[in-house]
Amino acid sequence: MRLFAAVTPPSEVVAELVAAVAPLRSLPGAGQLRWTEAASWHFTLAFLGEVDEALLPELTERLARAARRYPPHELRFAGGGRFGDRVLWVGADGERTVLRDLARSTAAGARRAGVAVDSTHDFRAHLTIARATGPVDLRPYADGLADFTGTPWTVDRLELVRSRLPSSGVPGERPRYETLAAWGLGS
């Protein structure tokens, strides 16, 4: 099964971000972007990829330990950026060091459980807003989010999420996410 560990923002701050993103959808080239659905917005702490179901008991124990090590902490959506002209994202401000350390512990715990975690990229707190499906200059979109600052919220939970990739062949179909387990931070 395809898994990742994540932090999910509460609906009220997601609604603020939806409002901030809405004007971007009318910029030139917006039709060349595959916009992510607000209901699935999250901060990926560790992408675990395909995980053998036999590893789940050890993996969940390791992730529970990682969650207990870190206190609830405050974040807010802040600013925007892009990874080249492929991905448009919104960033985070607040206690990012705690989030980064939680991400590192999550990845380390998964590796100890036998999961081959991709460690080629350092953790960077971001939430993907859209992906380019063709040639688009993402700079105006990132500029449109540059001054955005959302309401602070408390990160208090780590989730293990299953990602089911589209299989119908219907254009535009998105992955479906299912939370398999969740742990309160610091508890």
Image (cartoon, helix red, strand yellow):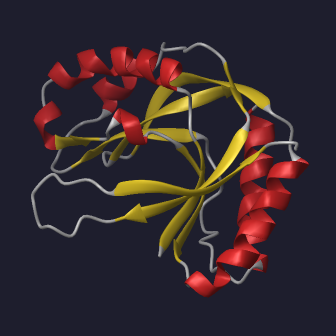
Left or right for 131, reference 12: left
In-front residue for pair 124/178:
178
Left or right for 103, reference 5: right
Image quadrant where residue 5 sits = bottom right
Question: Looking at the picture, how far across and down is residue 11, in whole percent?
Answer: 49, 25
Seen at 71% across and 72% down, the residue is: 59
In-front residue for pair 90/55:
55
Above or below, 87 against 152 in this view is below
Question: Looking at the picture, how far across and down is residue 101, in whole percent?
Answer: 80, 49
Above or below, 52 against 126 in this view is below
Left or right for 155, reference 2: right
Seen at 16% across and 47% down, the residue is: 135
Asked whether residue 108 appears in the rendered view, the answer is: no
Seen at 48% across and 14% down, the residue is: 148
- The quadrant of the rendering that contains the C terminus is top right
Image quadrant where residue 155 sits = top right
Asked whether residue 149 appears in the rendered view, the answer is: yes
Seen at 66% across and 82% down, the residue is: 55
Left or right for 187, reference 59: right
Above or below, 125 against 176 in this view is above
Label count reads 0
Question: Looking at the picture, how far across and down is residue 44, in whole percent?
Answer: 56, 50
